[in-house]
Image (cartoon, grey):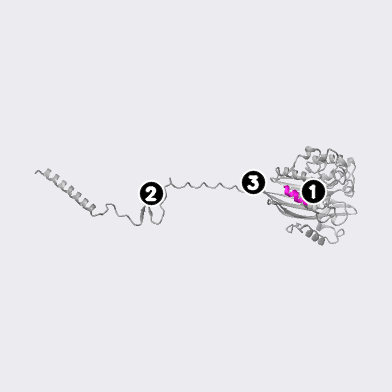
Amino acid sequence: MTIRNHCIRIILLLAAALILLAGAGCQNGDSASPEPNPGITDAPGGETAEIGQSAPMDPKLSDPAPAPEPERPEPIIQTATFAAIGDILIHSSIYKDAKTDSGYDFVPMFAKVRSYIESADLALANQETMIGGAEIGLSDYPTFNSPYEVGDALKEIGIDVVSLANNHTLDRGEKAIVNALAHWNKLGMPYVGAYLSEEDRNTPRIVTKNGISFAFLAYTYGTNGIPVPKGKPYLVELIDPEKVKRDIERVRELADVVVVSAHFGQEYADLPNDAQKQFAREAVEAGADMVIGHHPHVLQPMEWIETDDGRKSFVIYSLGNFIAGQEGERKRTGGILSLEIVKTTMGEESKIELRNPAFVPTWISMKNWRNYSVVPLWEAPKDQLAQPEAYYETIRNHMSRWMPELKFPQ
């Protein structure tokens, strides 16, 4: 046998021996696979996971991740301050006191209180007498007509809107109204409650301050028995509950805040009557945010009215006389109302909130029907008001009786 053949034989024998050994191992029942680790379990994808822990799921089989919530916009907050004053009732003693060589000047009469009005972003006055001008003859009670310069003075001291619907609107007829409205238009002063035409009446009075829009309306209980000229109901707005409701609903869609001036109530009564309360409630339910009352010539309290839909509106039943030629403590007492209006906007929705009601009581100072000056009540001369401090406390208690949080800045 050659060496080559001998080597081949040895290789074959070794291979046969290895085959026999492998077969014997299988016959003994031993696994050829390595013994599994008791602390390890197979995981999908060939990975391993500790026993007692869930194996990671196949991303193809898992639920999709939730979409991130959209970012909520930051609220936009805008604020404006609103002020209102009561009756501007120009008796002859007042316009005679204001007479100058060239006309009339009423501005000095308001020097002591104008800062309270000017500091507001928006201010309303009840112009009780028509400013028909001296050209048709000035006149006193019971049929008033006042100088144009009354309007100039109100503009000068910071009044932005005037209410003209009252029981004296028709005192001197259509001519006085036409003259007055022409002058208000000349001054660029929005007016409500008396109009030149149906078109004028149907034009919403909306004033915007600091991004907050205010719509104004005004109504009176009557005109002292003077009939409204036939076919011209626009010359003065009379209280008609259904019409008031429609008007409020109409401007409610156009403005953030609706302000309704109401000439109502009983003269010289300290508290509102049922008719006033009913009007205020109905106006608020229709959408009014504020009801500003006039006519009693004395102060009546204020209150909040809450609606079923969660709105909270403000009512003052009478602001009293701001300036007038009437005698008696109560008739010489008025005031300056102020409120903060806050508009919060989130996306396309906005909310209005009225905050921080405040009231500055005022006194009509005069002597012998001259030297008229409206002053803060605490500055009333002692020869006109014997105990101004005590009287001031009486007014504080009266005006805050239904609104204990009412502030009285000095």
Which comes sooner in the sequence, label 1 or label 3?
1
- The magenta span reads 278-288
- Tell me what residue is drawn at x 15 percent, y 48 percent: 13
With 105 as the anchor, is 54 left or right in this view?
Answer: left
Q: Amino acid at mark 2?
A: Pro
Find numbered disc 1 in the image and state the secondary structure of the residue it sits on. Answer: strand
For label 1, the residue is 262
**Can residue 115 be spotted in the picture?**
no
For label 3, the residue is 349
Which comes sooner in the sequence, label 3 or label 2?
2
Give x and y (percent) for residue 402: 75, 58
Residue found at the far left of this picture: 1
Closer-to-camera residue (128/277): 277
Q: Amino acid at mark 1?
A: Ala
Closer-to-camera residue (225/336): 225
Q: Amino acid at mark 3?
A: Glu
